[in-house]
């Protein structure tokens, strides 16, 4: 389980996120699930470009933030 992974804006666009995702795919080679804040359009658009599919939205306590639920499956 990984929680709260962020790339500081000053370091975005340098391949760090892609490297972290490659590492995560090696650790979980068949399936990865995640949530992303609905308002963070650039993040969820990136996940979609990386092959994740949105499975819906939910309110997550205790923050009560609206999140998009994503899943990536190998193959």
Image (cartoon, rainbow, N blue to C red):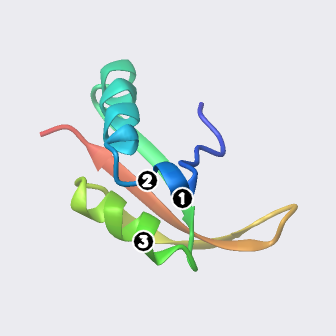
Image point 31% across, 21% down: which residue? Answer: 26
Q: Is residue 6 above or below residue 35?
A: above
- Mark drawn on residue 42: 3
Q: Quadrant of residue 15?
A: top left
Where residue 48 sits, quadrant-wise, is bottom left
Q: What distance separates the C-alpha of mark 1 from that of mark 3?
A: 11 Å
Tag 1 residue: 9
Q: Tell whether label 3 touches label 1 (CB within 8 Å).
A: no
Viewer-nearest residue: 67 or 22:
22
Label 1, residues with CA under 10 Å away: few <14, some 14-19, many ≥20: few
Q: Nearer the viewer, residue 11 or 73?
A: 11
State if disc 1 and disc 2 touch (CB < 8 Å). yes
Q: Looking at the picture, how far across and down is residue 64, in whole percent?
A: 81, 72
Q: Residue at x 45, y 46 (%)?
A: 33
What is the spatial separation of the Cα atoms under label 2 and label 3, in whole angstroms? 11 Å
Q: Residue at x 35, y 54 (%)?
A: 13
- Is the residue marked by circle 2 packed among few (<14), some (14-19), or many (20+) residues within 10 Å? few
SS of the residue under disc 2:
loop
> Any mark on residue 12, and which?
2
On the question of residue 75 being in view, the answer is yes
- Left or right: 69 as drawn, with respect to 37: left
Name the front one of labels 2 and 3: 2
């Amino acid at each position: 389980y990984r929680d709260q992974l962020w790339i500081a804006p000053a370091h975005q666009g340098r391949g760090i996120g892609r490297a972290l995702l490659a590492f995560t795919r090696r650790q979980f080679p068949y399936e990865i699930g995640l949530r992303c804040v609905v308002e963070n359009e650039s993040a969820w658009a990136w996940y979609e470009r990386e092959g994740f599919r949105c499975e819906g939205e939910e309110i997550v306590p205790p923050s009560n933030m609206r999140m998009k639920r994503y899943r990536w499956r190998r193959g």
